[in-house]
Image (spheres, rainbow, N blue to C red):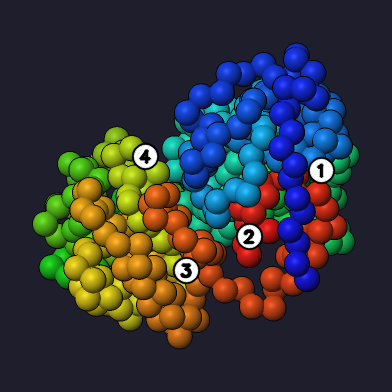
């Protein structure tokens, strides 16, 4: 089934009321070299519903925007008439700390929400990049979690209810504000990781997690990345239950510029938590598995921030970057394959791996070196082929915009593509939201 709705050239300034177009167009609204004709920042869910109804009726192409921390993700847009900022929806609606639930509007930043929850020693178990800028809605629309994913699973596992404004302006609800309300098919899962292509998330209810009494971060250095990965897998297979396990190669350590990391070595970092006696036992078990040191709370917070932000802040933004998901048992072989393929093309990658949940982030910093588009495409093709043989998928997070080709940034999802196209045709038949940006250019 083909899904290619047309977008006639319509100026939103002629059809959208002036009071809705309350923001100037700036360079930060540019997506893949396309700039909108206007920017809107609705101040309420009702105002956003009215705006979407108008834009849908006039065949305008919309790109929702939260904090803009991952605005470059996805395929190039086919059309882009209006940027719609969600940061005007910025209220924490409720926090039932006794029931470990909270409801928040989508434009609230992650750090603001976490600060609210911290008053009752609770937190939302996601740690996305740039939390001071990233919004709740944008984080869910992207769908990537941070280093704590292994212990707390995906962002979708924290959601118990959601409100979404559809492209035609209709407001839909799924789930509820208490955990036991959730039943039947969870429509919210369509929008988590959907990159805002089926609707705009406007309000979310979460189940929360109590803050652990004490935490510790252990760090060890190795001569090779394989050594650090092998030790990481020993921890993964042991009785220890870390919040996160991360390996960083020397190239990534160099890019991060952290004083905590030895930039000439490959590093294994383990985050532990629990009650004091239990935590002490976990630390001892880790020290029996690899030689490591504890770092203080301030340095640990800075280091975990660097890990979450890798590839997204200005200091570590790469020329080319991919995120690979594969079974944890295949990560050592996959890492070696990426090094080998990069050697063949004279490109040195910077690698950050999350072995416990099988995620590998590979970034390349070309420093202005002239690299042919065909060279990059060939390398990505080889990485994808090798990843598929290891039961994984490769997603391109960063790519030189002046060298973009018809290469889909998402990997081949096989038979699920027909279902995705059908969903897009059902919920957004006019192609109003992010046209062409998602998997298969839908």
Quarter the N terminus occupies: bottom right
N-terminal of the two: label 2 or label 4? 4
Q: Residue at x 49, y 76 (%)?
A: 392
N-terminal of the two: label 2 or label 3? 3
Q: Residue at x 47, y 61 (%)?
A: 405
Residue wearing tag 2: 441
Q: Is residue 129 above or below residue 390?
A: above
Marking on residue 166: 1
Q: CA distance from mark 2 to mark 3?
A: 16 Å
- Look at the image and tell me whether residue 210 can be seen: no
Give the crowd class for mark 3: few <14, some 14-19, many >=20 residues within 10 Å.
many
Q: Residue at x 74, y 33 (%)?
A: 10
Who is closer to the viewer here, 403 or 167? 403
Who is closer to the viewer here, 234 or 156? 156
Residue wearing tag 4: 313
Which of discs 1 and 4 lies nearer the camera? The answer is: 1
Which of discs 2 and 1 lies nearer the camera? The answer is: 2
Residue wearing tag 3: 394
N-terminal of the two: label 2 or label 1? 1
């Amino acid at each position: 089934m083909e899904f290619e709705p047309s977008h006639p050239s319509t100026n939103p300034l002629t059809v959208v009321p002036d009071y809705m177009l309350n923001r100037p167009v700036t360079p930060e609204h540019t997506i893949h070299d396309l700039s909108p004709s206007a920017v809107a920042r609705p101040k309420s869910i009702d105002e956003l519903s009215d705006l979407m109804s108008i834009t849908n009726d006039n065949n305008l192409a919309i790109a929702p925007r939260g904090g803009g921390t991952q605005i470059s993700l996805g395929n190039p847009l086919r059309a882009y008439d209006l940027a719609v900022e969600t940061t005007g929806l910025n209220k924490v609606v409720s926090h039932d700390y006794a029931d470990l639930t909270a409801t928040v509007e989508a434009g609230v930043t992650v750090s603001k929400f976490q600060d609210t929850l911290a008053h009752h020693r609770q937190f939302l178990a996601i740690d996305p990049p740039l939390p001071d800028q990233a919004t709740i809605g944008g984080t869910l629309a992207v769908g990537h979690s941070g280093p704590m994913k292994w212990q707390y699973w995906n962002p979708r596992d924290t959601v118990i209810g959601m409100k979404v404004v559809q492209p035609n302006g209709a407001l839909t609800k799924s789930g509820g504000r208490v955990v036991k309300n959730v039943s039947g098919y969870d429509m919210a899962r369509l929008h988590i990781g959907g990159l805002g292509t089926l609707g705009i998330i406007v309000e979310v209810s979460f189940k929360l997690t109590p803050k652990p009494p004490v935490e510790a971060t252990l760090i060890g250095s190795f001569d090779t990345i394989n050594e650090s990965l092998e030790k990481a897998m020993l921890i993964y297979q042991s009785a220890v239950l870390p919040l996160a396990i991360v390996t960083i190669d020397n190239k990534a350590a160099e890019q991060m510029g952290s004083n905590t990391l030895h930039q000439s070595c490959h590093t294994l970092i383990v985050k532990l938590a629990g009650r004091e006696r239990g935590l002490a036992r976990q630390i001892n078990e880790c020290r029996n598995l690899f030689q490591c040191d504890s770092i203080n709370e301030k340095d640990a917070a800075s280091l975990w921030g660097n890990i979450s932000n890798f590839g997204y802040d200005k200091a570590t933004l790469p020329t080319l970057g991919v995120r690979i998901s594969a079974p944890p048992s295949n990560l050592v072989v996959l890492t070696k394959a990426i090094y080998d393929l990069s050697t063949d093309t004279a490109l040195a990658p910077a690698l950050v791996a999350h072995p416990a949940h099988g995620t590998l982030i590979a970034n390349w910093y070309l420093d202005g070196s002239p690299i042919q588009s065909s060279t990059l495409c060939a390398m990505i093709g080889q990485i994808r082929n090798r990843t598929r043989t290891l039961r994984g998928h490769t997603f391109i997070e960063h790519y030189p915009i002046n060298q973009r080709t018809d290469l889909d940034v998402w990997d081949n999802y096989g038979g699920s593509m027909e279902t995705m196209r059908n969903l897009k045709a059902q919920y957004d038949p006019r192609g109003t939201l992010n046209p062409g940006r998602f998997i298969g250019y839908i």
